[in-house]
Image: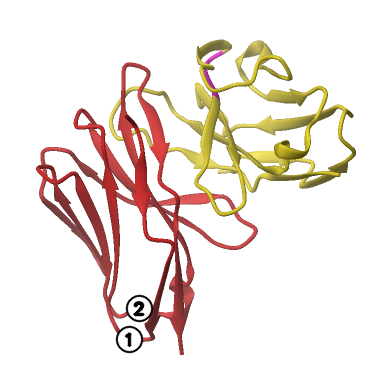
Amino acid sequence: EAGVAQSPRYKIIEKRQSVAFWCNPISGHATLYWYQQILGQGPKLLIQFQNNGVVDDSQLPKDRFSAERLKGVDSTLKIQPAKLEDSAVYLCASSPRGGISYNEQFFGPGTRLTVL
Amino acid sequence: GEDVEQSLFLSVREGDSSVINCTYTDSSSTYLYWYKQEPGAGLQLLTYIFSNMDMKQDQRLTVLLNKKDKHLSLRIADTQTGDSAIYFCAELSGGYQKVTFGTGTKLQVIP
């Protein structure tokens, strides 16, 4: 079974530029998550999708961050414009369906963003 | 609140037992997890425990849950160099079944 795919793996941009990250979850997984992991901290949930609908985006800085999951499969996360404090690893995860059983999440390798 | 706290660093000798501790604040958590993160890789679920259990054993891993004190621990028996990684505890709670991760404990295994 293929895992969660993310691209790019690394990205360096200057502040005020825009950037987009792509995630392809495990086939058949209904729930998709985007996390931000700042160096030395645990992952922080940015947004959770159930199929193509948003379940929780309470911690997404909506003035600069946006995410979509068209057709309920892959997803993109965009930052526009980027700030220095956005430097982090952006993790995508998927699970078969949120809210049941122990809800194991399968994580991709992440995209490391550096904002200069 | 949803803060999940862990000590930052633990160093053990190969062959010894490791104990990683975690405290959480949401008493309504249904599941608690331990995830492992190796350098350059995403998180991987190691084990989990349902909130009505006190203990769970899985090969070299033992999870202890003290709901009264909101304390979770992970014991790794016979720690190996391949166990060197960052370990995150996490809790599942809330109407949206949100997972909140701790700050992570970096385990260093000395040969």
Amino acid of disc 1: Gly
Question: Closer to the camera, B46 or B93?
Answer: B93
Disc 1 target residue: B15
At label 1, counting other C-alpha atoms closer than 10 Å, the crowd grade (few under 14, some 14-19, many 20 or more) is: some
> On screen, B7 above or below A98?
below
Q: Which mark is residue B74?
A: none
Q: Which chain is red?
A: B
Q: Could you tell me if the residues under marks 2 and 1 are in contact, i.e. CB atoms within 8 Å?
A: yes
- Residues in magenta, as a range: A47-51
Q: Check chain identity for marks 2 and 1: say if they share one.
A: yes
Residue A75: image location, x then y, percent? 68, 23
Disc 2 target residue: B79
Question: Closer to the camera, B1 or A21?
Answer: B1
Examine the residues drawn in magenta and state their main secondary structure.
strand
Q: Chain of mark 2?
A: B
Residue positioned 40% across, 46% down in the render = B102
